Amino acid sequence: FKHRGQLKYVRSLMPFSVVYSTEDGSTPEQDRAATVVESAEYDFNLSIDMSGSDVEIHGGANPLLFIRAENGTLVYSESEVDGDDAVYIGVFHTRSPKGEYTNFLFQFSFNEERGAWRIERVSQEVNLLEAPASVSNGVALPMTFLSGMTALPDGVLLAYGSSNAESRLRMVPWSIFFSYFG
């Protein structure tokens, strides 16, 4: 995603870290250190059991840019926004040791005062239509994982994989998309 004219990417969610690439594609150590945020202790409070250290968190699509209006609502933006009004929404999924996938959205922003990126909130689970089960770790499980999203005038088009067998799309109206955050 772009922020202040510079290409950046979310390196990890736990701890939350945003880095940028230099012209040669490298990410110098000092840049990585400068972009790790204090939200490393963000309480994800997910609807799944994260107590086991074997639960994996994987990123997904490039985040979408929104403008935070004065009343706190978010409005999709196709052009860059400066300051604390820029808010991004990205996707991630978890994978349990049994091979169960759970999908989420997360909202994050750059805090101008602190000079740091931070996760603001995480959605409830995003349910997707599953294909027939595939075998994972010797167990047949239906699974879906978000892999992309595109903003359209009427909502968000979610791209996802289903049971390691199919690629699917789901159109989500804006009202439903924002309702995932409760």
Image: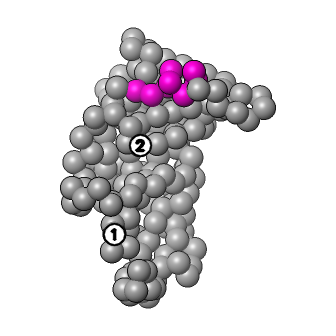
Residue 11 lies, with reference to residue 132, above or below; the image says above
Residue 46 lies, with reference to residue 109, above or below; the image says below
Residue 23 in the magenta stretch? The answer is no
Q: Nearer the viewer, residue 86 or 27?
A: 27
- Report which quarter residue 37 is drawn in: top left
Horizontal side of 123 relative to 170 (left or right) equals left
Residue beneath disc 1: 97
Residue beneath disc 2: 13
Q: Of the numbered discs in the image, which one, if any, rests on residue 152?
A: none
**Dot 2 lies on which element?**
strand
Report the magenta residues as a range: 30-37
Tell me how the rendering is colored. one colour
Q: Position of residue 5 (x, y in %)?
A: 66, 24
Horizontal side of 63 relative to 53 (left or right) equals right
The amino acid on which the numbered mark 2 sits, given as a three-letter code, is: Leu
Residue 111 lies, with reference to residue 58, above or below; the image says above
